[in-house]
Image (cartoon, helix red, strand yellow):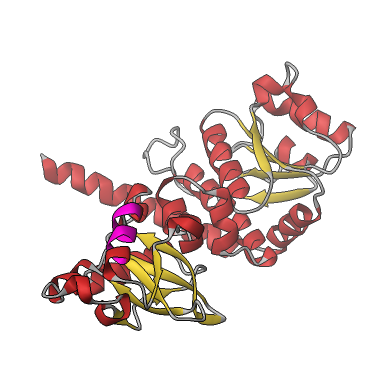
Amino acid sequence: MSGIFQDTARRVIRIEIDALQQLEQSIDDSFAKAVELMIAATGRIIVCGMGKSGHIARKIAATLASTGTPAHFVHPAEASHGDLGMMGAGDVVIVLSNSGETPELADVIAYTRRFSIPMIGVASRPESTLLRQSDVALVLPRAQEACGTGIVPTSSTTMTLALGDALAVALMEHRKFTPEHFRAFHPGGKLGAQLSKVSDLMHTGRAVPVVPGDAPMSEALREIGQKGFGVVAVSDPQGLLQGIITNGDISRHMDGLASFEAHNVMTPSPVTIPPDALAEQAVGIMNDKKITCLLVVDPQEPRKLVGLIHIHDCLRIGLG
């Protein structure tokens, strides 16, 4: 029995792949005009759709918003009861409907025409009301639905979703949207964690354990205990980074430890990282070196200590 289900899955995927290939071949100047219309928008991109198209519209709006294009979804039925006011001058409206004749879209279409709000229509019938009324018509190929009956939106919604992704990526590339910009829209979750910088997590100022090189080890041990990172940075007479004292350094100098100064016990030239490095890179270095923290230094002056990042700081946001 399981083989039948697997055959069904492969058939559905093949049908939808074929639909996407048809969509790829259908891309023409209308797509470029749609992108240019969205670039010219001084307001927001409003995405509308009913039923399954509404679910796709929500996803497209979310993708646009998270990649630097202000956008939101408006439900066509709610639009008829007051939400039309969410559309205005400077906006561009994208309306999705496989048939292009969805009754609930009538008020949205009429509103955009009345107030000269540019509208991009996405449908599979060029002669439909939606595409005839649109400023830019994006015609979906009349591909076979994967359900086999032609009544369940499958291939059509897949094509619409892919078309929305294509619009979003085209806008991203035009605006030179970078991972740094992306992080600003995704401060939480795994994406936010992966794009966090060392500077976002590091400890600075008086929180960083530091002693001068000529400090007695009693002072160094006190600094380690008070700051709680298990290490202490050692500075030279000019206040620049000279070395680091770790638990391993202390263990190797247990005999006569009290008689030593910090510079006698430290490991010179410690492993460091700049503040603009990704926190994920810091985790990789700590794992590779089997250490629990890194000293953060000014990239323009590699011996100028600006902070400290601990593995716990990274684990707290889901890295590690």
Tell me which segment is drawn in magenta.
220-226
Residue at the spot 21% in from the left edge and 69% down from the top edge: 290
Is 6 placed above or below 276 here?
Answer: above
Is 239 placed above or below 177 here?
Answer: below
Residue 5 visible in the current orientation: yes
Quadrant showing the N terminus: top left
Q: Residue furthest front?
A: 259
Residue at the spot 78% in from the left edge and 33% down from the top edge: 87
Place of residue 176 in the rendered image (x, y in percent of width and height, measured from the top left): 65, 67
Number of numbered discs on residues: 0
Main SS, magenta region, reads helix
Closer-to-camera residue (190/148): 190
Let me know if residue 245 is in the magenta part: no
Q: Residue furthest top?
A: 81
In the picture provided, is 211 more to the left or to the right than 51? left
In the picture provided, is 62 more to the left or to the right than 286? right
Quadrant showing the C terminus: bottom left
Quadrant of residue 101 within the rendered picture: top right
Let me know if residue 225 is in the magenta part: yes
Residue at the spot 31% in from the left edge and 71% down from the top edge: 216
In the picture provided, is 67 more to the left or to the right than 144? right
Place of residue 242 in the rendered image (x, y in percent of width and height, measured from the top left): 40, 81
